[in-house]
Amino acid sequence: MSRSNTDHLGRPVVVVTGMGVVSSLGTGKSENWKNLTAGKSGIHRITRFSTEGLRTTVAGTVDFMDVEPMSAPALSFALASSATGEAVDEAGFSGKDFPGPLFLAAPPVELEWHHRGEIYAQDIDGNEVGYAKLLKAAREQKRQDMFELIQFSRTADLLAEKHKTKGLPISLSTACASGTTAIQMGVEAIRRGECTTALCVGTDGSVQTESLIRFSLLSALTTQNDEPENAAKPFSKDRDGFVMAEGAGALVLESLESAEARGAEILAIVRGCGEKADDFHRTRSSPDGSPVIAAVQRGLDDAGLDSSEISYINAHGTSTPENDRMEYNSLKAVFGDQIHQIPISSNKSMIGHALTAAGAIEAVFSVMTIREGVIPPTINYNNPDPDIPLDVVPDVSRKAEVKNVLSNSFGFGGQNACLVLGRA
């Protein structure tokens, strides 16, 4: 059956031809999908570093990657490299120069505590270690390895070199919306005719002492440490915060015309993208949900779809009291009472919140939901919140015909982005 290479607005249709993923549930799409649809949790006690004195001692860390010496930038690259390799292989570009640009969502980087200690260790004179003195020690030592480690563009540069992508690689960080933003940038580049293929990646390996403390000081993290696998409770009445996690998701995007010309398998269609900034607060979302409502509506409009045409919603669903309520209220404003009949689940109940990588990982899972006809569950839903009366696909995955998925990503700093993904 022939189909148009342009969408309802006359733009090139953008499709997915390759995907890869790593999460706390494992490496690769097959292992992740098996565990995700089985309702298995990848959240566990933190063993990589001491959690003595910390209020939160659980996370969805990826501890099975061989990274030495361990650091957030090094792990973020290892995760991205694994997911990207799988995506490029599936798309049929393995062993070849990748024919398009790279858009990478990466976490902010800085010297970690052990790096600071390593730099300062050569300059101990008994005085208190202040930041000014640390900078002085760093300047005096001229450590090229440390300099390269904390360059924000470093991961993108390494990936671009490995896969021989075209042009200058783009590194971006829009908080928890970053992975979705990277995909949106690839979509827009193809629609503008700047390229026919794009590699879009989100990665995050930044669970370490200081990041855990910072989120804890914001009262954003769960403190339910006794049973790690039960700590993430999206939409449940007893939810008390999110669980930090690590992982990476990668998608090869391509114009439909390009994919068909080379005989590539089309996994899904990226029908629409929506975004809206929120200047209400540095971390909190606007209580009235207006920016999120606008982002969702823009995604639907961009896709040329009515709200009734969405089969499933992959929720942002962080398990924080305020965010889950805001997401429900915003979706109800767009979908009306219909929202109570649409299945809506949160992958974060099992993998945790992978921050910068979350949107890309969840986009991969959304495409797999469409292709496999199985909706992953929201686990730990033992105490329903009467103020959030959703069909969260509680605890057990569900077979369903899924034609179009709305995938939500809402980040600190007012970054709100949504994807509408459809069956090929």
Image (spheres, rainbow, N blue to C red):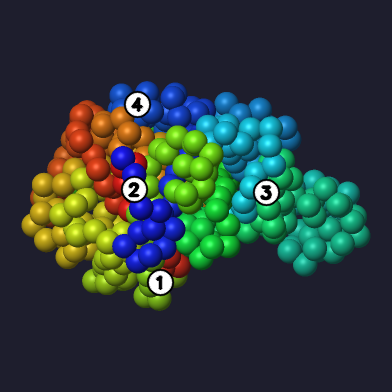
Q: CA distance from mark 3 to mark 4?
A: 36 Å
The answer to which of 274 and 44 lies nearer the viewer is: 274
User: Which marked residue is nearer to the observer: mark 3 or mark 2?
Assistant: 2
Task: Please name the residue shown 58% across and 37% down the image.
Answer: 88
Quarter of the image where the C terminus is located: top left
Check disc 4 and give the amino acid type: Lys
**Res 401 → quadrant:** top left
Residue corresponding to mark 4: 40
User: Which marked residue is nearer to the observer: mark 3 or mark 1?
Assistant: 3
Residue corresponding to mark 2: 3
Q: Position of residue 182 (x, y in %)?
A: 51, 55
| Element at label 3 | loop
Q: CA distance from mark 4 to mark 1?
A: 34 Å
Q: CA distance from mark 3 to mark 2?
A: 29 Å
Q: Decide if residue 308 is in sight here.
A: yes
The answer to which of 183 and 403 lies nearer the viewer is: 403
The answer to which of 237 and 97 lies nearer the viewer is: 97
Do the residues bearing badges 1 and 2 touch, measured as CB atoms within 8 Å? Answer: no
Q: CA distance from mark 4 to mark 2?
A: 39 Å
Mark earlier in primary sequence (3, 1):
3
Mark earlier in primary sequence (4, 1):
4
Q: Residues within 10 Å of mark 2 (few under 14, many from 20)?
A: few
Residue corresponding to mark 3: 165
